């Protein structure tokens, strides 16, 4: 891959945006390579947790506007097909059965902010700014809206998407857009510490079950959600991880995950 690197160390898969000369703008090739990388991580038995990060000064500046300009003569069907590429990437990250941690060292703007905010955890350097600036150029933050309404609620989403203004990392943490602000020199260590903790302390099956339920339950009625949760509870009891974990706890033995 030209614009994305993929590495594995200590059961952590590192997916890195590597188009710094274009501020890691989301071109079709970069989106395709990210999709390949996340598919690989999802299927890689040696990977338990995924870290998404970037090279260069900026995490991701959003869509490649020069490319979008070339699409203005496309038909609706052609533009829909192009939009589905980013849709599929976002869906892959949000629903994959492994925890994804975003390590944001620099600005995450528009589609780049969307890319970070759909991850399960977002750790940020204080200098990074966040925002969905699409309305300022006559575009719309369409795809990320689906996830943000779940994450933040209508009031915060209107504030972010209708203003189009950038916000500081501290503000992003306050409203729940990101998980935590960490000093720049400590960011990588903090992310690795969390990833290693999840790998060593938690069952991979349990994290996958939990992430799947978090994604699916908001679409259900209370009754359907409870019925679904009861079914998942019953399925979880039958897994080898659950048997192993409970036996270890009762026998006061350390469990190796």
Image: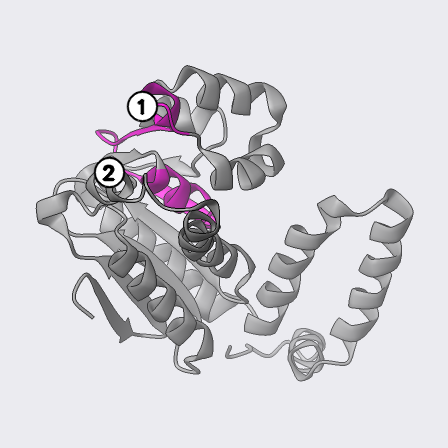
In the image, residue 30 above or below residue 76: below
Quarter occupied by residue 23 = top left
Residue at the location (42% across, 48% down)?
79
- Label 2: few (<14), some (14–19) or many (≥20) C-alpha neighbours in 10 Å: some
Along the line of sight, the residue nearer the viewer: 110 or 121 = 110
Q: Give the range drawn in magenta.
A: 111-139
Where's the N terminus, which quadrant?
bottom left
Residue at the location (62% across, 24% down)?
154
Q: Residue 173 carries which label?
A: none
Q: Where is residue 171 in the image (x, y as percent from the top left)?
A: 39, 21
Q: Position of residue 34 (x, y in %)?
A: 33, 62
Along the line of sight, the residue nearer the viewer: 62 or 170 = 62
Q: Where is residue 77 in the image (x, y as percent from the top left)?
A: 48, 51
In the image, residue 256 above or below residue 69: below
CA distance for labels 2 and 1: 10 Å
SS of the residue at dot 2?
helix
Where does label 2 land, which residue?
65
In the image, residue 15 above or below residue 156: below
SS of the residue at dot 1?
helix
Examine the structure image and report whether residue 10 is included in the region drawn in magenta: no
In the image, residue 22 above or below residue 140: below
Residue at the location (74% across, 72% down)?
236
Marks 2 & 1, CB-CB < 8 Å contact: yes
Where does label 1 land, which residue?
137
In the drawing, does residue 181 fall left or right of residue 93? left
Q: Which of marks 2 and 1 is nearer the N terminus?
A: 2
């Amino acid at each position: 891959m030209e614009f994305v690197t993929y590495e594995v160390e200590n059961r952590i898969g590192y997916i890195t945006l590597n188009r710094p000369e274009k501020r890691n703008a989301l071109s079709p090739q970069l989106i395709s390579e990210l999709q390949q990388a996340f598919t690989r991580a999802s299927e890689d038995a040696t990977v338990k947790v995924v870290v998404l990060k970037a090279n260069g000064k900026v995490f991701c500046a959003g869509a490649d506007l020069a490319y979008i300009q070339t699409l203005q003569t496309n038909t609706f069907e052609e533009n829909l097909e192009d939009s589905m590429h980013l849709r599929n990437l976002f869906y892959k990250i949000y629903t994959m059965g492994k925890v994804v941690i975003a390590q944001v060292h620099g600005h995450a703007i528009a589609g780049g902010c969307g890319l970070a905010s759909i991850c399960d955890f977002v750790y940020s350097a204080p200098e990074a700014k966040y925002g969905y600036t699409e309305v300022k150029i006559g575009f719309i933050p369409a795809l990320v809206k689906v996830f943000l309404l779940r994450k933040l609620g209508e009031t915060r989403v209107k504030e972010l998407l209708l203003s189009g203004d950038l916000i500081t990392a501290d503000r992003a943490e306050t409203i729940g857009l990101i998980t935590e602000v960490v000093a720049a020199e400590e960011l990588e260590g903090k992310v690795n510490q969390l990833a290693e903790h999840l790998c060593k302390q938690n069952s991979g099956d349990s994290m996958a079950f939990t992430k799947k339920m978090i994604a699916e339950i908001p679409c259900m009625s209370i009754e359907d959600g409870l019925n679904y949760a009861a079914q998942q509870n019953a399925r979880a009891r039958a897994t080898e991880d659950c048997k192993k974990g409970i036996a270890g706890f009762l026998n006061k033995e350390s469990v190796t995950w």
